[in-house]
Image (spheres, grey):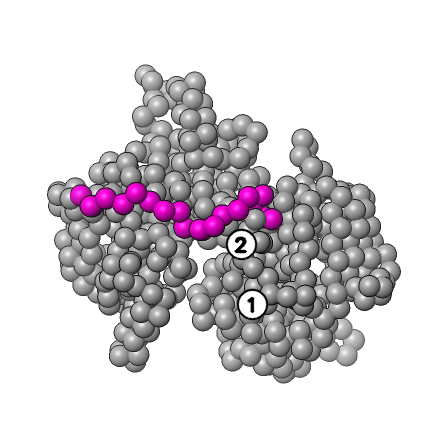
Amino acid sequence: MRSEAYLLEMKDIVKTFPGVRALDHVSFRVRQGEIHCLVGENGAGKSTLMKVLSGVYPHGAYEGEIVYKGREAVFRGIADSEKAGIAVIYQELAQFPELTVCENLFIGHEIMKGNGARIDWPASLRRAEELLLRVRLRVDPSVKIKRLGVGKRQLIEIAKALSKNVGLLVLDEPTAALNDDDSANLLNLLRELKLQGVTCVLISHKLREVLSLADTVTILRDGAVVRSLDARAGKLAQRDIIRHMVGRAIDDIYPKRNKSVPGEVCLSLKGWTVYDPATEREILHQVSLSVRRGEIVGLAGLMGAGRTELALSLFGNTPAYKITSGELEVKGKTARFTHPKQAIRMGLAYVTEDRKRNGLVLIQDIRFNITLAALRDLVKGLAVDRQAELRAANEYKEAVGIRAPSVRQLVGNLSGGNQQKTSLSKWLFARPDILILDEPTRGIDVGAKFEIYQLMNRLVEQGMSILMISSELLEILGMSDRVYVMAEGRIVGETPACDATEQIVMAMATNAQEASA
């Protein structure tokens, strides 16, 4: 095919960091008007490649050549790539919560009056309404963006890109934090934009999305392109993509476990009702559930169902939430935690859904993060035994499979999968009996997911109890022994995982909402 058929060509891109070659002679080509999916394990080089394209790593900071619209492109910063018509939307949205939707849409390229001395607000609002309509979003452009959910905020970022006459739209894990409805809405929008002539590069770990959308799939592994697959030549198979991503076949994403009869009840909740002073409303209503020793219990539900709020209230987040009624028993003893340290001492651990903001100290190293939750166990006299701390960190690094040169590596420099393993290690070092996992595989690749699933299976085989919150129904069904379904702060159903299907779980969640509407 002639070179002119490609909107973008990145030729022999090499990008190195101290001691690491992140991109090793990567060549990447995108056809005009296609949806091109870029996949690979965490740390494969996907985001680095897009940062080279966007000018985050400017011309001269890498080797190789970028050709855009048939001409060599020299981007010395983000402003240069945006001027050329390239927009990159990252997983962590760059928005100003205290500003309105309209202000966020045009910040940095405001619509000005006459001589450019003042912003033309009426024209800005009219243009904002046009852009929001184009992304099928009906919201008041004068409302503050902090009042909107993450799904709507993603659409606003796309509208912002369209306001700059974007020709190439790059989205980095756009559905990682979205529920199924918002994800489907976003994917349908990308299909519509393709029909309107917008070319899209999508980075995603959700292979079902990739298979449903992609015209072309490029697979990176260890900083190099290992395969480019053309969906127009025939239907792509998920197992083939996985094999190229991880360098080996994974026949079953959810590894089999030697299941035994669960033991005694380790965590029991009856009539748990919680009030949120911030919103002045009851957020959990008469919740009852149980988790047995050696069992994985899945907690499913749509976004806003109250699953994370339940986990936080169990773990002692009472400064934020007020428990108005209900009984909690942990290992047969009545409990009510007013601080997480009390829950930790009783054998509970909570792995947050937001590892970067709430789970890890990114500016510290692996050693610091792994030992943080139980540092008191390493105190010798009046100081921390640094040698014991180092030994413990190395032990968990090896046991969990954190890929890093040493435990002195800063956590902020790790891939998402290795950050998640570090977050898990932190709580495993506290030696819990009951582990609450909130979205344990969000934003990580299929290979890292498989390793975390294997770890979960080992833990329950050793007698630990796991309560797993997940928005991925296949993950809930593939890993759980029993499933509870939540909707609007209530438990609306319970079923053995072997009897459940995606349709059954979704029917439970949505019917409860329809009944209360």
- Point 29% across, 70% down: residue: 508
Q: Which residue is mark 1?
A: 212
The secondary structure type at the circle numbered 1 is: helix
Task: Please say whether residue 265 is one of the residues in the magenta stretch.
Answer: no
In which image quadrant can residue 130 be found? Answer: bottom right
Q: How far separated are the C-alphas under marks 2 and 1? A: 15 Å
Q: Which residue is mark 2?
A: 239
Quadrant, the N terminus: bottom right
Q: Which mark is residue 138?
A: none
Residue 124 visible from this viewpoint: no
Identify whether 490 is placed above or below 420: below
Give the percent coordinates (x, y) of residue 317.
Answer: 29, 50
Q: Which residues are magenta?
A: 244-263
- Point 68% across, 32% down: residue: 18
Quadrant, the C terminus: bottom left
In which image quadrant can residue 425 be found? Answer: top left
Give the percent coordinates (x, y) of residue 234.
Answer: 64, 66
